[in-house]
Amino acid sequence: MSLLFSPLKIKNIELKNRIVVSPMCEYSATDGFPNNWHLVHLGSRAVGGAGLIITEATAVSPEGRISIADLGLWKDEQIEKFKEIVDFIHQNDSVAGIQLAHAGRKASFDTPWESPIQLDEQNGGWDTVSASNEIFNPIDKTPIALDIAGIKKVKEDFKSATVRAMKAGFKVIEIHAAHGYLLHQFLSPISNKRIDNYGGSFENRIRLLIETVEAVQEVWTKENPLFVRISATDWADGGWNEEESVRLSALLKEKGVDVIDTSSGGLTLAQQIPLSAGYQVQFAAAIKKETGIITGTVGLITKAQQAEEILQREEADLIFFARELLRDPYFPLHAAVDLGEDVKWPSQYERAKPRKQS
């Protein structure tokens, strides 16, 4: 059997294959509520055969949304539709996960196809927060540096959202600490200019993420996996880097985190990213080698054989697919054919399954 279609057990959850639907914002919610777009979008990837399906960045508070159309899980009324989506995913032999997030200074936007400029309060926007009052883009609003009370609220919001995620039936939680959003803003010296216990040294800059993990673990079941997504490097001088990512991953493993979902970038406009096929695999490989933690990799991975080779070289344990799964919700079924695997198709689609030629 190919590694891509071999099962992987993490705590009490067994994934039927190593294909993960990476969190991808749909900008299609109203007041944080999921709707039938999300049901069809996520549900079709379950029908398509992915082992694990992670919802888009789901805000733990209204001000934590990237855009006014982001998903949220900050109130109990939002649970019901999430549960419908989760149940459908599980009925189709996939595992449902949710990415909990706070956008920090990269918040208060309209949908990307409407405008690239942050919204003001008169147009539905809100004040943004960050580690410091450093802006991301010269045209952005200056964020408010979180005080200790604000930091405490962020941790409590992640904790409360975790309780709601459990009620909705999610089997995996991923904490979003990548792509220049709030927790990443604390990690990187580029955006974190604090002089208190949450800034300066490596130990101080990682403090909010560690405390957020601990807050989530207070309520999250120990039987199910906890992922953390990080940007392994800022791709910029003076920023967060690969060495720090390895150190952080080792500490997160000690804290009981099960998987490091390894991405990169998103913190600064000064980033210089050498885009190429599988350009981020190196970071997942380094973290896996140095710490022994389960890693996932993502980024310009588009072919079944490419994913298989990453796994065969032991550079990662899970392959997160993003744009390829937007192009083709049934990529896992097609990938199985490419790798010569005979996987189960939905009964409703069985008559379309390719047959081996005798």
Image (spheres, rainbow, N blue to C red):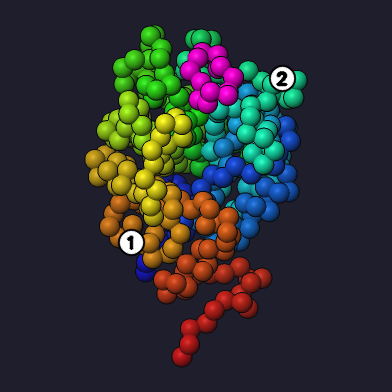
- x 43%, y 49%: residue: 299
| Figure check: 213 above or below 334 | above
Q: What span is colored magenta in the figure?
A: 133-146
Q: Position of residue 341 (x, y in %)?
A: 44, 72
Furthest residue to the left?
290
Q: In this view of the protein, which residue sits in the foreground, 168 or 113?
A: 113
- Is residue 24 at least partly visible in the picture? yes
Instruction: Decide which of 125, 350 is in the foreground and name it.
Output: 125
Could you tell me if residue 160 is visible in this image? no
The N terminus, quarter of image: bottom left
Q: Which secondary structure class fits the magenta region best?
A: loop
Q: Residue at x 46, y 91 (%)?
A: 358
In the image, residue 329 sits, relative to residue 220, either above or below, namely below
Find the distance from the CA under tag 1 to the CA under tag 2: 49 Å
Camera-nearest residue between 220 and 48: 48
Residue 154 colored magenta?
A: no
Q: Mark 1: which secondary structure?
A: helix
Amino acid type, mark 2: Glu
Q: Residues within 10 Å of mark 1 (few under 14, many from 20)?
A: some
The image quadrant that residue 289 belongs to is top left
User: Which disc number belongs to residue 121?
Assistant: 2
- Residue 42 point in image, percent of width and height: 62, 51
Q: Could you say which disc has been placed on residue 309 in the image?
A: 1
